[in-house]
Image (cartoon, rainbow, N blue to C red):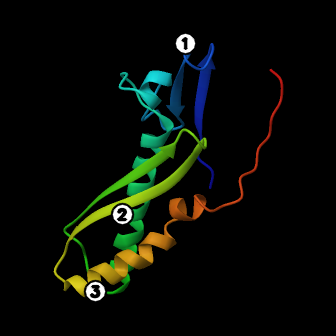
C-alpha cells in the first residue's frame, strides 16, 4: 500500500511560501512558510504534520496491542512532540505523551505503550532508510 502527500514551494526560503496536500484531500493546498515553521505564522509545517502522523500511528498500534491482550481501550489520547534543531538542520527528537483510558491496570497499559513506541510504522520510519527520486521539471 502506498499513500502520498504533495508540496509545492515558490520563492526563496524566508520570503517564499508553499502549499501541502494529501492524497485523501484531508489537506488541500494548506499553506506553509518559513514563518509557520520557525516563527508563529498562520499555516502548517512539516514537523506538526509528522507529529500528527506519529500520534495517530502510535495510537492505532497501541489499540492493536491492547486488543491482542483482550483489552478494548475507551480512549487513547496521544501527542507526539517533534523537535527540530535548526542549527543542525535535523529533527532531533520525537516525544510521545499518551493517556490511555481502559479497564486494565497501569502496568499492563504502560507495557503495551512501550511495545507500541517501537512497533508503530511511523516510529520505525524515523530510523528508516530514505530513498529519493529527483528530476528537473
Q: CA distance from mark 1 to mark 2?
A: 37 Å
Identify the mark at residue 62; answer none if there is no mark: none
Identify which residue is drawn at 40% across, 48% down. Answer: 52
Q: What is the quadrant of the N terminus in the image? A: bottom right
- Camera sees residue 33: no
137 shown above or below 69 = above
99 shown above or below 81 = below
> What secondary structure is found at the residue carrying circle 2?
helix
Q: Number of marks in the image?
A: 3
Identify which residue is drawn at 63% across, 50% down. Answer: 2
- Residue picked out by circle 3: 108
Q: Earlier in the sequence, mark 1 or mark 2?
A: 1
Query: Which quadrant of the structure image shows residue 94?
Result: bottom left
- Residue picked out by circle 2: 59
Q: Are marks 1 and 3 in contact (CB under 8 Å)?
A: no
Identify which residue is drawn at 35% across, 83% down. Answer: 111
Q: Earlier in the sequence, mark 1 or mark 3?
A: 1
- Residue picked out by circle 1: 15
| Mark 1 neighbour class, 10 Å CA radius: few under 14, some 14 to 19, many 20 or more | few
What is the x, y in percent for residue 98? 28, 64
Query: Which quadrant of the structure image shows residue 69?
Result: bottom left
- 91 vs 129, left or right, is left
Most extreme residue toward the front is 87
Q: Are marks 3 and 2 in contact (CB under 8 Å)?
A: no
| Mark 3 neighbour class, 10 Å CA radius: few under 14, some 14 to 19, many 20 or more | few
Q: CA distance from mark 3 to mark 2?
A: 16 Å
What is the x, y in percent for residue 110? 30, 79
What is the x, y in percent for residue 7? 59, 28
105 shown above or below 13 = below
What is the x, y in percent for residue 137? 80, 20
Amino acid at each position: 500500500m502506498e499513500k502520498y502527500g504533495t508540496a509545492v514551494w515558490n520563492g526563496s526560503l524566508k520570503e517564499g511560501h508553499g502549499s501541502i496536500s494529501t492524497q485523501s484531500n484531508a489537506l488541500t493546498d494548506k499553506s506553509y512558510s518559513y514563518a509557520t515553521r520557525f516563527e508563529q505564522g498562520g499555516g502548517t509545517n512539516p514537523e506538526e504534520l509528522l507529529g500528527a502522523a506519529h500520534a495517530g500511528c502510535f495510537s492505532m498500534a497501541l489499540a492493536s496491542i491492547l486488543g491482542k491482550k483482550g483489552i478494548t481501550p475507551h480512549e487513547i489520547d496521544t501527542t507526539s512532540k517533534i523537535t527540530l534543531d535548526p542549527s543542525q538542520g535535523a529533527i532531533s527528537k520525537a516525544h510521545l505523551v499518551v493517556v490511555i483510558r481502559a479497564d486494565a491496570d497501569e502496568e499492563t497499559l504502560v507495557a503495551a505503550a512501550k511495545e507500541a513506541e517501537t512497533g508503530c510504522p511511523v516510529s520505525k520510519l524515523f530510523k528508516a532508510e530514505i530513498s529519493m527520486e529527483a528530476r528537473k521539471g
